[in-house]
Image (cartoon, helix red, strand yellow):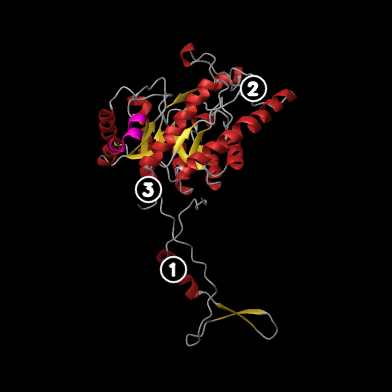
Amino acid sequence: MHNMPGSRSLSRRKFLAATGGALAAAPVEARGASGIQTSLAPDPDAPIALPALVIPAPPAVARKIPIGVFDPVFYHLTLDAFLDKLAALGLEAVEVATSDYPATPHCPVKEMLDDPAKARAWKRKFDDRNIRIGAFSCHGNPLHPDSRIAERDREAFHRTVLLAERLEVPVIVGFSGCPGDSESAKHPNWVTYRWPDDFEEVVEWQWKEKVVPYWKEAAAFARQHSVRRLAFEMHPGFVVYNPWTLLRLREAVGEEIGANNDLSHLFWQGCDPVEVIHLLGKHGALFHAHMKDTLVFRDNVAKYGLLAFEPHDTGRDHLSMVFRAVGYGHGANLWKDIVKAYMDVGYQGILSIENEDPFLAGEVGVERAAYVLKNVRAELLTQDGK
């Protein structure tokens, strides 16, 4: 993907209208025998040698990126009731969970793999309402040192790939996973700081022995089944947790690896969201986008630092941050810049609202986030003249 200009270029007609008069009135530059440049009034009967013109390219058309939702927030609804709710909220797309983490009743994966007719009937429900299935979401830890957990999550991934192939869903969202620190480990070991040296040894062992071999095999399986976009959420606790680790895995495994760009995990790490979008877009690694905000409690960060993570229900006296609905951690102006950045890099996915706001739970948070996103998108499209 290539970055597009941030400002609109003049159309050819407007450009010529703006410059034609100035060009006609400009004196013609000439050089005499002495080589000294002089200005002469133009001879109306003589041909005029105009300077070379650089006419700006037509402006890129801003794409109306569909706004949708990640379905676990509506886990209590049947599929039909869920789709009716999307229509009522004016949402245009959906990201559907296909594994047990988190589980929803909306996608009976095994039934649809066993019976192609059921799969077609399921897909038709979305098509009839003009709701785009932007991604299947298969979270888990396929690198877990407990082989039972790893095998469960690997099987869920395989089934999701097969269903995505059958229903032509272009993106599978998930986590990169996290191994233990040795073959005898029982629990994942997420290492970020590289000193003392044994931490460095753990990280490099994980990547060499577990992370890269598994994802090379998994990406090859996906490729064999026409799935070319595995979108990793850059999430703390997993080996891919920021843009650098994502691009490291992409370089090691291949172009099937890309980002589910959930900015809520990057805000508190100090990332600039627009810079991240342009970076990932430049590398062709922007596959999916969770729309979720983060509120950083600056007074607590001043005392306890950014890594003061505790369950939200313990109170906010010491918390460094909390997830919020779009617009409730950062203002609408920043979210406008974010949506514009997605448009500028030619992002082809959906904007998938994931609501984990403890204060605006459930449908309320989805509705508030959708309101912000619809308004900033409409403003951007209006500015583009579309």
Residue at mark 1: 16
Q: Amino acid at mark 1?
A: Leu
Front-most of residues 296 and 290: 290
Query: In the figure, 10 relative to 237: above or below?
Result: below
* Mark nearer the N terminus (3 vs 2): 2
Q: Are discs 3 and 2 less than 8 Å apart at CB?
A: no
Q: Left or right of 73: which side holds 2?
A: right
Residue 222 vertical placement versus 385 (above, below): above
- What amino acid is labelled 2 in the image? Glu
Question: Can you name the residue that lies furthest to the bottom here?
Answer: 45
Badge 2 or badge 1: first in the primary sequence: 1
Residue shown at the point (47%, 68%) measured from the top left: 19
The magenta stretch spans residue 116: yes
Q: Which residues are magenta?
A: 110-117
Numbered label attached to residue 381: 3
Disc on res. 183: 2
The image quadrant of residue 121 is top left
Question: Of helix, strand and loop, which one carries label 2?
Answer: loop
Disc 3 packing (10 Å; few <14; some 14–19; many ≥20): some
Q: Mark 3 belongs to which amino acid?
A: Leu
In the orientation shown, which residue stands out farthest toward the front? 114
Q: CA distance from mark 2 to mark 1?
A: 70 Å
Q: Nearer the viewer, mark 2 or mark 1?
A: 2
